[in-house]
Structure formats: structure tokens, C-alpha cells
Image (cartoon, rainbow, N blue to C red):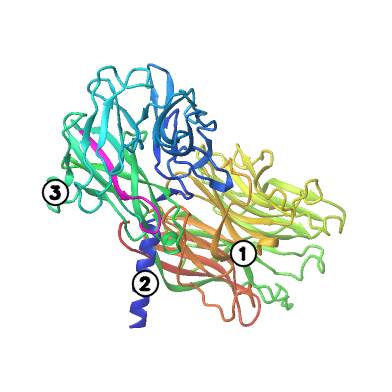
Amino acid sequence: MKKGLYLLVLLAALQLQAQDRAVIRTDFPDPTVIAAEGKYYAYATNSGPAGKFMNIQVAVSRDMREWRIIGDALPEKPSWGYKDFWAPHVLYHEQLKKYVLFYSAETVDTAAGKAIGVGFSDRPEGPFLDSGTPLIVRPGFEAIDPMVIRDPRSGKYYMVWGSGFQPLQIREMAPSMTAFARGSKTYAVLPAGADKDYGRLVEGAWIDYQGGYYYLYYSGDNCCGVDAHYAVMVARARNITGPYTRLGAVAANKSSVILESDASMVAPGHNSIFRDGDGRPWIAYHAIPKAAFDKKRYGRVMYLDRVEYTNGWPVVAKEMPQAVSIRWTDSVTVSTGYRKSSTGEKLPVYGAQYPRLLKRSAGQWLAGYTVLRNKGYRSDVRGGLELEIAESSDNGKTWVPVSTITDPGRDLDNAQLIGLPGGDLLLAGRSVRWQESYRLPVYKSSDGGRNWQLLSVIDRNEGAPGTLGKPDKGIYEPHFYFLADGRLAVMYASEKHVTESPSYSQIIAQRISSDGGKTWGTEIWVAHTPGHPQSRPGMPVVDRMQNGRYIVVYEVCGPEECGIYYKTSADGVNWEVGLGTKIPDHKGAPYILALANGSLLLSSNQGNVSVSADFGHTWKKQEMPWQHNVPYETDWHQTIWQSLYPFGDDTIGIVTSRKETSGGHAVKIRFGRIEKIGDL
């Protein structure tokens, strides 16, 4: 019974996790989104993200998933308004050749109340300069929430606004956008109180034209705070000025609501409608995340969802990757390493460690891992750690060693495999004489991994014995990946800048090869912490997500105690400065895998595996594939240097260096079945 209850709780938690469609995760109320100049721009009511107050927030994105708040669209307050800069709407006016901002604000004449202003800019991000005079000042009527549309049938511009407890109103605009058209009439298009569930107060109007109808979206009736009770509703008309028919007047359930609170969010509303590059309609809106609401935090963040017009009415299609859980099954051993040398001499206890795999074709795999077949380079001038390559022809069930790569007199480890388009294989590693010489060599095989030749060196640091220690100045842990244009990229950890000014104990570096690994470009810094020289980001792993963005995960040792962090990038080359975002429940040596269904899997030395169904924004811990005998804090060597791979449509494998009771480590694979939890 307890097990069944646990599974139900897990299911509910995963569904809650996967349903989080928030894209701007700070207070960003009343959002308007437009497509302009090859990007998407979002505008929001005044707030203070990262401690900087902005009158009108503006954010930008290239893909609608990753957004960056870039500043204040209205940095200079108008002479007539002094606070409460609400509900911005921006459009591009082709005749004026200007971006036009409409917004509401509290007037300096406190008796006049709210007013609607107009500003202009040459750029979508602003800065917008107010026209100098408010468009609407109407005591006794809540002059808020302006939205302006160019009527696709007549070519005229109309503003819809309001309204508190009064009707939403619409009126034709003058060509200047600073006044209403001469002789135009104000129409009341939708009264408050018509919708029993949320219609006590109506506001946040938006008009979208589709299939011969004008669709009037609106929200009610309490947007904010502990008593938030808010939803998006819709009405439609054949003419822009009405009359409008509410969905609730014709729907069987008598409700006009198309979007309301669910298990992941509270009080969604005040939406805008825009279209992506393929012409598909989307809805942007704010809501309070349920987890925050339960903790009495009421900031409104921005969400995006698809809109589909079905049977003459809009339907919100909540698109996210499918949530999954992992059920772990059988395990296999790839290698236990060596206990005796080729001459029968007993060896130091090491086993096999740091495994990485490469899929060659259906059922065909290679594994690279570190072994010790001698007493080490300090005791044997030609000794040191070596890389062994094993092959599987039955989709990972059994393995046979096929080759060994050595660098006599040095420790060679940190294997990383990748296949080139022509069929050749590359293997990168770390070749070390500790505190003396550090190299990241690249080896090439043209016969499926049987024979290897040195191709290049990604980076190196050379010195006399002992000169590259105290502090260490090494380079470690290379990870290959391809960029979208076909170039080969590698990330690795570097201590080479520790004695520079400013000093960085360790950074994550990147280099790019345009010739298949023969030569490497200049160093690119991916993760470091200005002002925090003791932070040590390292062990990077990169994958490309189904939304087209790249994600890199890495540990940060030092003051961050080897916590796991991540960043994303549109092109896999340009990354934001800083340490990135921390991921909970993980420490040491992460590995990331992007599944075909859009979900992400993450593992680490801590032994945990987590799933993200929203491209890394939130994570749900799964059952551990390997049980630890003692807490991780007592012994972190129990499952180390893990990596993840897909072995089929519904099967993954986690590869680890598993601590043996007899000493040393063995390379093992535990397979897991991907179990889907519905389309979310």
C-alpha cells in the first residue's frame, strides 16, 4: 500500500513539474509579446528584477524559450505621470515608421486617477519617449490596459481599453496615434458581470483577427495577491466594434473561460496574442507559480502556450515535453580492470574508471575507460594509467576489449569519444605528469577503434617538475560535441589562469575545430566567476536540446562544494558570463542527456538521476540506479564519473565506476526503462 501511494505521489509530482511552462521566471506582469527584427520582444508592467526598478520592463528572445530582460523601455517618466506604469502594448506603425508604446499610469493630478499614454521609439527595445500629453484622462473610469490593433479589413487603428467594474471600450485612433479619430465614437464592447465565475471585473483586453472573426480576449476578476482569482475569457464578433458574443453564451458549460488555474499555476491572465515565424498563434500571459503561491510569494511570471482555433473558438494547447520516469532494470559489467601485470606481478588496486561510450550503429557500441596495467609512471619509466577500448555488438549486454591507448611515462585518462561524419573516430583524453606537464591529446581511428594515432593536442601546459603545482595549473576532462554548422567543439576544465590577474582557480574553456580535430581555435571562456577566484567550475558535459538550444552542465567546487550548475546557449559558442544556475540534489561530475521526446536526464557522483521536462528550468529526482552503502558525504567514491546514453526508444543506460568491496572500481552499466506519464 505504501509503495502504491509513493507511486501516486511521484506521478503527481512529475506532472506538476512538467506542466511548468513559465519562460520569464521573475515578476513580469501583464505581458505583451511581439515579433520584430528577427526576435521576440516582451513588455511588462513596472517591477524590480534583480533589484533594479523599471517603469516598463522589456525582454528579448530568439526562440521564445530563453528570455533575457534587457532594460527599461520607458526610462524617462512622462511629465504627467509619476507611478504605476502598467500594461504596456507595443506595435510597429508602418506609416509612422516607429514603434509605438501604449501604457497606463497614475497622473500627477491625483483627482484624475489613471491615464493612458503614448510613446515612440525607432527600436523595439526602446527607449520610448512619451508624446507629452496623455491620450485618455477620464476620472470616474478606470483608464487602464490599452491595446491597439490595425483592423485587417479596413486598415484603421482601434484602441480597446478598460475597465475595472465598467465595460471594456473601443474607439478608432487618429493616424498620429496620439489622439482618437475626429468624429469617432466610443463603443462599449463587453460589460462587467456577464461571466459569473470571473467576470465581476473585466480588464486586460486583446483583439485577434482569425477566420473572419474578431476575438476579444479579456481577464477577470482579481489578478493579484493572496486572494488572486483570475482567468482568461473570450468573446467574438464579425465587426471590430461589436456586438461581441461571449463564449459562455453558446458553450454547453456556460463558461467563457479558456485559461484558468491548474496544478502548476494560480490566477493566469492579462494575455496577449502573437504569431511565431511560422504564423502559428501563441498566448502570453502572467500567472503565480503554485509552488510560490503556497509559500505566500505572489510575483506574476510570464508563460507561453500555443493557441489553436477549433470550431470557431480559441483553445489553449499547453505544449511541453512529455514527462517521464525511469524504472531501473538489469546491469552488466564492462570491465573490472587488472589485478596483475602481464608478467603476473601484483598491481596497485585501481580497477577501471571514468567510462564514456559511443554508439557506432544499431547495437554496436564502443566504450573508453581508464585502466592501470603497471605500477605507475613514478615506479616504471614507461608506466602510467592507460585507456582501454572495448566493443559491444549486442547493444551493451557484453563487452570485449579491442585496443589500448598509452602515453608511456604519463597518466592517460578522461576518455571522450565522438564519431566524425566520414566514419573516423576521435578520442580525447588527459595526459599528465602531475605538477609538471598537462596535455589534452586527440587520437584518431579509421578502423573502428582497433588502432589509434595521435592527431592533435587541444591544449597543453608544460613546466619543470613541480613548477605547475601549489597552486595546480592543469587542464582536464575534455568533452566533444558538434555545433549546428558541423564544426567540432570541445569543452574542458583549465587551471592555467590561476596565477594571472585577476586570478581564477579554474574555469571551463572551449575551443572549436573547423577541420575535424586537426587544429583548434583560440580559448573561449564558458564558465567563471568574476570576483570569486576560488570557485572552480569543471567537468563540463554538453548536449543539444530538442528546442535547438545547447545546455552545458558542470560541477563548481571550492566555496560551492561541487554543486552542479548549468547554462544554455542558442549556438553552443556564446554563453552568458558567470556560474549559471544551480541544479538541486546533485554534486560532482554531472552528465546530461537530451531525450528525443524533449526531456533531459542528469546524473552526478552523488548517485542521483533527475528528469527535467522544461529544458532545465526545474528537475525531479528519480530512484537511484545504484544504492549507496553509506551517505555520499561519508564516501563520495561509491558511484563516480557517471554518463548516460539512449539504448533504444524507451531504454537508457547509466554507466558508472562502481566501487568494489575488494577494492578499486569496476565499469558497469545499469539499464533503465523510460516510462511516460502522459502528454503534458
Residues shaded magenta: 214-227
Classed neighbour count for the residue bearing mark 1: other residues with Cα under 10 Å, few (<14), some (14–19), many (≥20): many
Q: Secondary structure at mark 1?
A: loop
Residue 379 among those drawn in magenta:
no
Q: Main secondary structure of the magenta part?
A: strand
Q: SS for tag 2?
A: helix
**Mark 3 secondary-structure assignment:** loop
Point out the frontmost of discs 1 and 3: 3
Query: Which label was assigned to residue 588?
Result: 1
Quadrant for the N terminus, please. bottom left
Circle nearer the N terminus (1, 3): 3
Residue at mark 1 to residue at mark 3: CA–CA distance: 55 Å
Residue 34 horizontal/vertical position (percent): 39, 33
Spot occupied by residue 171 in the image (x, y as percentages of width and height): 27, 27
**In the image, is 557 to the left or to the right of 125?**
right
Looking at numbered disc 2 in the image, what kind of residue is underneath it? Val
226 inside magenta stretch: yes
Near mark 2 (Cα within 10 A), the count class, few <14, some 14-19 or many ≥20, is: few
Name which quarter of the figure residue 559 lies in.
bottom right
In terms of depth relative to the viewer, which is nearer, 441 or 498?
498
Does residue 586 appear to the left or right of 1 in the view shown?
right
N-terminal of the pair, mark 1 or mark 2, is 2
